[in-house]
Every structure is written in structure tokens, then in C-alpha cells.
Amino acid sequence: MADAAEVARRYQAAAARRRWILKAPALLTILLASFGPLAVMLVYSVMEKGNYGGVAFGQFSLDGWTAVFFKYDPFDETTSLVVANLTVFLRSIKLALVTTIAALLVGFPTAYFIATRPAESRSQWLLLITIPFWTNLLVRTFAIMGLLSNQGLVNNALIWSGVIDKPLQMLFTDGAVLAGLVYVYLPLMVLPVYASLERMDFRLVEAGYDLYATRWKVLRHIVIPSCKPGLIAGSILVFIPAIGAYVTPRILGGGKNMMMGNLIELQFGQGRNWPLGAALSITLLAIVTVALVVYIRNTAGKGGAHGH
Amino acid sequence: MATKPQAFDPKSQPGFGFVAGATIVALYLPIIVLVAFAFNATSSLGIWGGLSLNWFIKAWNNQQIVDAAIFSLWLALVAGALATMMATLAALAMTRTAPYRGQTLAYALINQPLIVPEIVTAISLLIVFSAVKATTGYSGAGYLVLAHTAFCIPFAYLPIRARLEGMDLTFETAAADLYANPWKTFLHITLPGMFPGILAGFMLAFVVSLDDVVITELVKSGGQETLPTFMLGQVRRDMTPEVNAAATLLLIPSILLVTAVHLINRRK
């Protein structure tokens, strides 16, 4: 019965072909305008830099990569650490970590409170958390800038209540960037933590109280361990965009309080060092990838995806 | 949150309700203040001088803002529609089939734009597009359409896939039993069934395109200002509530569409 096998094989081949044809437009677009350019950037990072931006093609060089951390001085022939770049790296990591911790401290109680509401009001609370997440990031950053500016609401309120007598300089500080990052990415913490709390078996909590546990002990030994995947997922979902932030530090941090995203952009603007910019981009991408691998390991098989 | 000692709720934790309430206030207060000052009579962004529509009228008469708004809408519609069509086709191919070779790879590729930091994508596009611009001389809106379509695809794909996976195969089998050809089955059964997902996908893609600033800022050529890139350009200037008025207009579609998606999802 070779014919039947042949028919089945042909049928399967046709189905596979149809699947690839259906997928082709989406995959090609992403290859062309997202994945492909990343590969090109990798090539750019190992080229000699051009005189007026761009790169000198065919001239292989690791200068872009060395320039991430080191600077060669042609006069006294020494190599020194580029403190400026290092500062930006450390600031980015520090700000992203503190943002994540702050989002955890605020996001967990919020998610827990929502998860313990009756079903109807739960969906309304979730909508309230979701709307800011989908509203324009730039607009939300502007909103924070408006609040923190010298003539802004916070300063006016403080002056009016007599706490201070002249405006505090709050904009263009690391604190302002931090406030902006937490504000912008908080929903990314609440949603996955909520998702894992929603699946929690609250009979365990009751059992804990039956065994004379205090509220803190119930939280510490029952609630937090059972929503740990959500907490880890939320932390990574906040950390990834926070460390790659560009708009928030640009607007709230001013020129001095740069993060990696701004340093990268600088190499393609005033810096005119495309290979360095490409190398910095890939470094940022590597950090994000490591965080992402942790995320996938953590959520794989647990259906830990959030919202929408 | 007054806890009566006799009514012990094992689910409640002290202070959590307060944090949740404060979170909602903190999320909305800055936006409400921003919108409020768009209606300010004076040019201050911090001192209330009375109610007025002046800044909206100013924004309406500002040709730069109007052009940017129109271009933003056009770009979001075109890129959103393209991304939704591509995502629909891809979802049809990638759901409700037995696992096959390359499935994981295709799935990873579809979601790839979600993972990479926007600034990195923007820079890599700048590198590639500037080379293409230099060789072809073309500097039209095609680059922005292509870039926006690419990063909108995963957003359009998510709700469409979710809808397809939740759909019952019985109707399609029944249609096939009643001698409907595959195309008729698709047109009369599958497509209407997945329509809420497609609509949600398009709305999210539209909003995501409308919101983008980083990629647009680095990819755009002259005369391709969107509302967000226009606003970003105003940051270092003397800001007036005119920008608030523009920002307020930008908020409306997001809030409307997200609420709509929420309602669609709840009804299914």
C-alpha cells in the first residue's frame, strides 16, 4: 500500500507548505525590520569607524568593543578605563534594580489586594491597572515631568504648606528618573503577580491560620512562596525595559543623568562612533537576554504569561 | 478597611488595601494633572489660572501639531492594518496544529520585537535604513511603515492566537461534513469566530504604533514628524500647555481602545 503512504506524505507536505506561506509575510517583515538589522549591527560593531559617522567597510577592527570600557591615548601610549561609560553602565544597572525593588514593594500588595476582591470588582481593578500601561509612555513621562518641575504641583504644594520656601530641584536627578521608571513600569509588575495569586489556593491560608500562624507568617511561608513565579516574572518584566530605558532618562534625567540607551544614541549623534554604539547596543542586548533566559526558565510549563 | 475583630477575613492583609488605593491614585494623578493644565487659562504648568480652551485652539491652529497628528493616525492605521493581516495569517498557520519542525523558531521570531530594547531596534534600523537611503535615494514613509508593522505584529498576534486557541473545532468539522469547501468554512465559520481576536489585535497594534517614539525618532526622515516625536522635540524648549493639549489628544485613543478590548474580552 505504498500509494496510501505516498498520499499521506504528500498531504503533510502540502500542509507544511501552506503553513509556511501563511507565516511568510509576518516572518519576512520581522526578519527585514527587526531581526536582520540586529545581525547587521553585529557586523558594524567589528568594523573600523568612519570619519563622519558610519563605518569603513571591510576594515575589521575590535576598537568599537575595546572602547566600551577602555580608551587608548596615542600621546603617552597608555590604555585607561573609560570612567564615563562605566558610570553610565553602573547607573543603569542600579536604577533598573532599584526600580524593580520599588515596583515589587508596591506591586505585590496591590496585586494581592486585587486578587482577593470579589470577581466583578477584580476585573474593574485590573482595567484600572491596564489603562495606564497602554497609554502613551511619552505622555506619562511628561506627566511626571510636570509634577516634578520647579513650578510643578509638588513644589507648589510644598511651598504652600511651608515645608520649603524655594523650589527644590527635582528634575534632572537620578531620583526623578527612578520615579519615572517606577511609574511607567509598575503595571508590568502588578499583572503577572496578580495572575499567579489568582491561581493560588486560599485554603492554604486558612489552614495556616488554623495552625496559629500570624498574618506575617502566612504571608512569608504561604502566599509569597506560592506566587514566586509571578514575582520573578514581574521583576524581570520590569527590569528589562527599565535597563533599556531611553525616553524616561532623556526627559527626566537631562543630559547628565544618562542611562545605557542614551549613551548608545549619543554614539550615532554627536559621538559619531558607530562601532562603539553597535557594541554598546549588543552589550545591552546581552544583559536583557540573560534576564530573559531566567524568565523563560522560570515560567516554562507554568503558563506564566500575563494579560492580553 | 476598618477590621472588626469578630469578622476575621483570612484573605485580608493589613495595609494592602491602602497600598492598592495609593497605587491607583499615583497612577492616575499625574495624568489628571497633565490633562487639567491643558485647560489652564494662563501659560503656567503649575499654577491654576482658570478654565479655558485656549491651548486646544492654539494646538488646532498649529500646523506642525495638526500635520503630526494626521501623520501619526495614518501611520498607525496602515501599520496596524498590515500587522493585523500578517498576524492573522501567521496565527492560522501556527495554532491548532500538531507540533511541527520550525514551530518554536517561528514563534520566537514573531515575538522577537517584544524582547529587544526599543533603542537597540531603533539604532539597528537607523544603521540599515541609512544605508538603503544612501543607495536608493528613497526617503519616503515606507521605512516607518515597515518598522512599525514589524514591532506591531507580536501585539496583534497575541489576542488573535488566544482567540483561535479558545475556539471550538466542532463547527468547522460540521461545516466540512456538510460539504462546505475549506474556503467557505474559513469565510463563514473560522473568520467570524476569530473576529473579536482580530479586532482586539488591530486595536492593540494601532495603539502601540501611535505610542511609539524611540524607533520613529531615529527612523523618520524630514517631514515625517509624528505627535510623539513632535512632543519629544519640545522638551528642551519653553513648554506651554499647548503640549499638554497635544498629549491629552494622544491619550484619548489609548483609553478608548483599551477599554473596548477589555469589554470585548469580557463578553467572549
Image (tube, coloured by chain):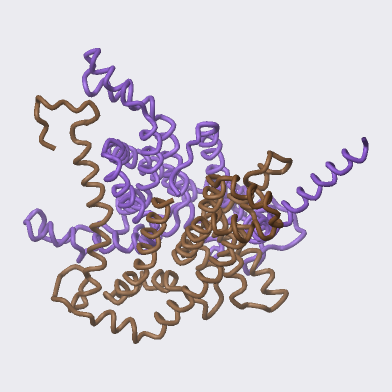
Quarter of the rendering containing residue B136: bottom right
Which tint is chain A? purple
| Picture residue at 63% right of the left edge, 77% below the top | B139
| Picture residue at 18% right of the left edge, 32% below the top | B14
| Picture residue at 92% right of the left edge, 41% below the top | A3
Which quadrant of the rendered structure holds the N terminus of chain A?
top right
Quarter of the rendering containing residue B233: bottom left
The brown chain is: B
| Picture residue at 64% right of the left edge, 54% below the top | B90
Q: Position of residue B19 (x, y in %)?
A: 22, 41
- Extreme-left residue of the structure: A162
- Relative height, residue A91 to residue B60 (above, below): above
Q: Position of residue A124 (x, y in %)?
A: 29, 49
- Relative height, residue A183 to residue A215 (above, below): below
**Foreground: A218 or B7?**
B7
Quarter of the rendering containing residue B34: bottom left
Q: Is residue A146 visible?
A: yes
**Foreground: B164 or B201?**
B164
Q: Position of residue B251 (x, y in %)?
A: 35, 66
Q: Position of residue A252 (x, y in %)?
A: 34, 59
> Is B46 left, or right, of B2 in this rendering?
right
**Foreground: A120 or A180?**
A120
Q: Is residue A255 visible?
A: no
